[in-house]
Image (spheres, rainbow, N blue to C red):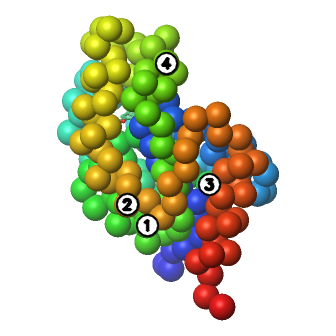
Amino acid sequence: MQRAQQHIFLTGFMGSGKSTLGKNLAGLLQLNFIDLDNYIETHEKKSITLIFEQQGENSFRKIESTCLLEVLDVQQPSVIALGGGTICFGNNLAQVKNAGLLVYLELSAADLAIRLKNNLSERPLLKNVNTEELVTNIAGKLSDREIFYRQAHLIVNGSNLSVQTLQQKIIDFKNENSPI
Ligand code: S3P
């Protein structure tokens, strides 16, 4: 089956606002919304935290890639909030870029730490990190991941980003890059 090519994907570190902005953007654009983390939890009938605890990160990444492929097959044009690590594993980045517009919500490690510090226990990859080491820990992970994030079609500063500004940046990008 031929894939719809016009999805909008949001990527970025945990806490960058992918799910909230994604849901609001889908509302504005009247598109379907899919949150990949929620899709995985429904598919596996367990929380992401439990998948990490019981099966480990490697199994989670396999499940994540399988679920991503299923989501890419959705024919209805959709806004899709990816997990923070999705495009950093396997062939996921290429698959995503081939299926639509990939937007990176960029935030500094310091800004991300402020957003994440009160709910670290919900994040399997950060749950054992002390608050004092949080910025350094995030900065390390970010620098490993930036090589993937920076391959997005569009990079948007995510601090104080309103859904209207995000929408406008996507419209501008599409206008600048559409064939005449
Ligand atoms: C992860 C981010 C999480 C979730 C999982 C792994 C990551 O999603 O997929 O805990 O590797 O950065 P959010 O970015 O939506 O928190």
Query: Is the C-beta separation of discs 2 and 1 under 8 Å?
Result: yes
Residue 16: percent from left, percent from top = 51, 35
Report crowding for label 2: few under 14, some 14 to 19, many 20 or more residues within 10 A (C-alpha). Answer: some
CA distance separating discs 2 and 3: 18 Å
**Disc 2 marks which residue?**
151
Query: Mark 2 or mark 3, which is nearer to you?
Result: 2
Quadrant containing ligand 1: top left
User: What is the distance, in whole Å, between disc 3 and disc 1 at their CAs?
Assistant: 13 Å
Q: Which mark is residue 114?
A: 4
Q: Is 35 left or right of 54, judged from the image as shown?
A: right
Question: In which quadrant will I find the C terminus?
Answer: bottom right
Q: Does label 4 point to a residue whose CB lies under 8 Å from ligand 1?
A: no
What residue is shown at x 38% (from left), y 51% (from top)? 149
Question: Which secondary structure lies at badge 4?
Answer: helix
Q: Amino acid at mark 1?
A: Lys
Residues under labels 2 and 4: Cα distance?
Answer: 26 Å
Q: Is residue 54 visible?
A: yes
For residue 162, above or below residue 116: below
Residue 161 pos. (x, y %): 65, 39
Residue at image x 62%, y 67%? 173
Q: Which residue is mark 1?
A: 97
Label 2 to label 1, Cα distance in Å? 9 Å
